[in-house]
Image (cartoon, rainbow, N blue to C red):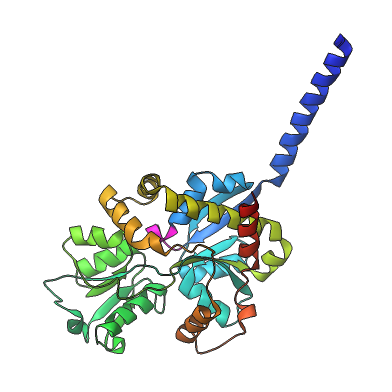
Amino acid sequence: MNALNIRLMLALTVLFVALWAVAAHAQTQKIRIAISSRSNTATTFYVAERKGFLKEEGLDVELIQINPRLGAVAVLGGDVTYTTSFFSTFRGIVQGLPMKTVFVVLKKGVYFLMVRPDVIKDVQDLKGKKVGVSGVNAGDHIIASELMRMKGLDPNTVQAIAVGEPTLRAQAVLTNAVQAVAVSPPHDVILQKMGLKAISGPPEIGNPASGLFAADRFIKESPQVLRRTLRAMFKANRFIEEHRDETIRVMMAAVPQSAEAAARSYDLELKALTKDGQMTDAELEFQMERLSDKKRPLDEIRDFSFARQALKELERR
């Protein structure tokens, strides 16, 4: 091979690398995912970000903490790409928001009803008292009500007070401004170390805790981005299932907690990760009945076709 041919091959190689870099950069898509609080229910998103699964799919992600009631508004306004809060978003969709459930992360989130043992001995003592919640009719409020109901107490006899995120709820119950709060791991362990006690919790109850919800317009206009996002979610869930110790390290980096609390949360909560990212029609109907007095056709509230496509694509690889 003469010198001219060598120079030509080198030039073509440099050109190919440059074009590949430009194409890769052009395919990188910025997405924002709204989470309601820094808790272990968002472990799939932490793993997808920190282990590079989103980057593998050409996605540059930003996780943003937003009040669950505002997550759907932010999605519809284009400020974020997806919101993850199940209860408030699903209820809004049933009531007419132009959005859909596209992925379910945790079918059965774990919650504990926490109290000061010197104030409340058992669930029946909460009659006429106050329960601190992130928001009235938010997910933790609904779960707190069901935890009471399963112990034989009518939740209508307990006043719900909107307090905010878990740290604010913890302060409210510690100062006796409210007499109970419902929290998910690791906040139950943190509160136990502060002297509080769980008077109700798993395995008595399990409800969806986390998913992905997208605007109808985004689903129509950006199907490739949606499929890439869901492939990253499936990769993260598989990693979580297969790598307990590394997942626990990711949890501790994302949410301040001890190794003991993270391990306990992994064993209690992450068993509920969905294999296919979906809920059955019967499960969706049940949630629709319990969260809203309205009903919509299921095709208007969920679209799991992209999850099925993403899963098939991963299996082919």
Residue at (29%, 60%) from the top-left corner?
Answer: 187
Residue at (70%, 46%) from the top-left corner?
Answer: 27
Q: Name the image quarter holding residue 299.
A: bottom right
- List x then y, in percent, for residue 294: 54, 89
Q: Magenta span has 18?
A: no
In the image, residue 216 above or below residue 242: below
The mark tally for this picture is 0
Q: Quadrant of the N terminus?
A: top right
Residue at (55%, 70%) from the top-left corner?
Answer: 72
185 and 196: which is toward the camera: 185
- List x then y, in percent, for residue 129: 22, 82
165 and 252: which is toward the camera: 252
Q: Is residue 76 left or right of residue 50?
A: right
Residue at (38%, 50%) from the top-left corner?
Answer: 251
Q: Magenta span has 37?
A: yes
Q: Name the image quarter holding residue 162.
A: bottom left
Q: Name the image quarter holding residue 270.
A: bottom left
- List x then y, in percent, for residue 126: 21, 82
- List x then y, in percent, for residue 108: 41, 70
In the image, residue 57 above or below residue 309: above
Q: Magenta stretch?
A: 36-42
Residue 178 visible in the current orientation: no
In the image, residue 55 above or below residue 277: above
